[in-house]
Every structure is written in C-alpha cells, then in structure tokens.
Image: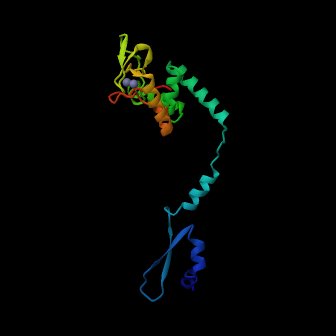
Amino acid sequence: MICMTLTTPSLLMMTSTVARLRRTPNDGDAADYEFIDNDSDDSDDRISHRSQKNYTVLNEADIHLRQEDNMKKISSILSISNVAAALLLRHYNWSVSKVNDEWFANEEKVRRIVGLLEEPRGLPSGKELTCGICFEVFPCDNMSSAACGHPFCVTCWQGYIGTAINDGPGCLMLRCPDPSCSVSVKI
Ligand SMILES: [Zn+2]
Ligand SMILES: [Zn+2]
C-alpha cells in the first residue's frame, strides 16, 4: 500500500531535499500524501553554487599592481591626481567602473561624499596662525592644513593622525579635524 510505504522515516529523509511530503486529512482512516515543490528549501543548491564559484588568490604584490593600475586609469580619465584617485577608489571598493559611473552622474555629489575639493585652498595669510586644536599661535611655517586650509600645528597633526592610525583602517578616509569640515586628509 503506497501510504504505508511513504511513512517510513528513511524514505522521508531521502525525499526531503527534493520535495516535502505533506500529510493531508482524508475522509477515511488512511492518510494521503502529496509531493510539494519546495522552492524555499534550496540550501543544498546554494551551497553547491557557492562551491563552484571561481576565485583568484592574489598576493600582496599582485594587489599593489592592480591598485596602481586602477589609480592610473582613474587619474587619467577624471584628470585628477593619483592621491585623489586612490581616495575615490577606496570609497568605491576599488571598482573603476563604479567610480566612473558615480563621478560622471554627479561629480559634485561624489566630491562632497569623499571630501575632495575642486579648488584646494591654502593656509590663511598671515605670519602667525592659531592652531584649531590647541589654540596656540605659531609661525606659518609650523602650520599645515588639508585642502580646506584649516590650520593646525605639526604636533596636533601628529597626534590626530597617530590616533587615527591606531584606531584602524578608518585612518585611510581621514577628514579635517575641524568639526565643521569634511574635507579629506591625504596621508
Ligand atoms: Zn596645535
Ligand atoms: Zn577643514
């Protein structure tokens, strides 16, 4: 009798990966079974797809070469410096096509997101400047700024960058220490 055969646990286990058996009430004492396509139970299929995906393992030198190559491409296409190209590529996960797409769709927006000014500003004029972190006054030569021109003394820059490096990879997307400014710091 078919109904009796299908209730054996071993057969249920064998069929569970391709279809699920569902017991449905019947008028009589005998149970009835039907096969249900089970689209959601495809975990085995997903695993087999994953295992078939091809990967290329790159060593550090290969990665460096590819990064240099991508930076040159972006720098040349967008007419920007290598440092700015690296900044964009880091933000867009080193995808040349993504950088191109986003840049040409809305350059101004991309510049704002990554903190890249179109026209870098220098330090404010004056023989002496006040550091925006320690508020001490220093000769101009002892001050430095990102492209935004906000002046900070060498010691404060060292502290700011050193802390960021110790905090992890976020230092690669470092912004100006001025709280009101989001211009990127190229280190
Ligand atoms: Zn300072
Ligand atoms: Zn700034």
Q: Which residue is drawn at 64% across and 44% down?
A: 55
Picture layout, residue 21 above or below residue 111: below
Where, quadrant-wise, is the N terminus in this rendering? bottom right
**Splitting the image into four quadrants, where does ligand 2 fall?**
top left
Residue 66 pos. (x, y %) = 62, 31
Image position of 49 (left or right of 182): right
Q: Residue at x 53, y 24 (%)?
A: 74
Q: Is 126 displayed left or right of 17 in the figure?
A: left
Nearest the eye: 135 or 32: 135
How has the structure been colored for display? rainbow
Q: Nearer the viewer, residue 75 or 1?
A: 75
Q: Judge whether 6 appears above or below 71 on screen.
A: below
- x, y (%) of residue 3? 54, 83
Q: Which residue occupies the extreme bottom position in the image?
A: 29
Q: Can residue 91 be seen in this view?
A: no
Q: Quadrant of residue 14?
A: bottom right
Please report the residue visible at 45 percent of the width from the left and 30 percent of the height from the top: 159
Q: From the viewer's side, name the closer residue of 184 and 94.
A: 184
Q: How many marks?
A: 0
Looking at the image, can residue 109 be seen?
A: yes
User: Does 154 appear above or below 17?
Assistant: above
Would residue 50 be found to the left or right of residue 41 on screen?
right
Spot occupied by residue 105 in the image (x, y as percentages of width and height): 42, 27
Q: Is residue 143 above or below residue 7?
A: above
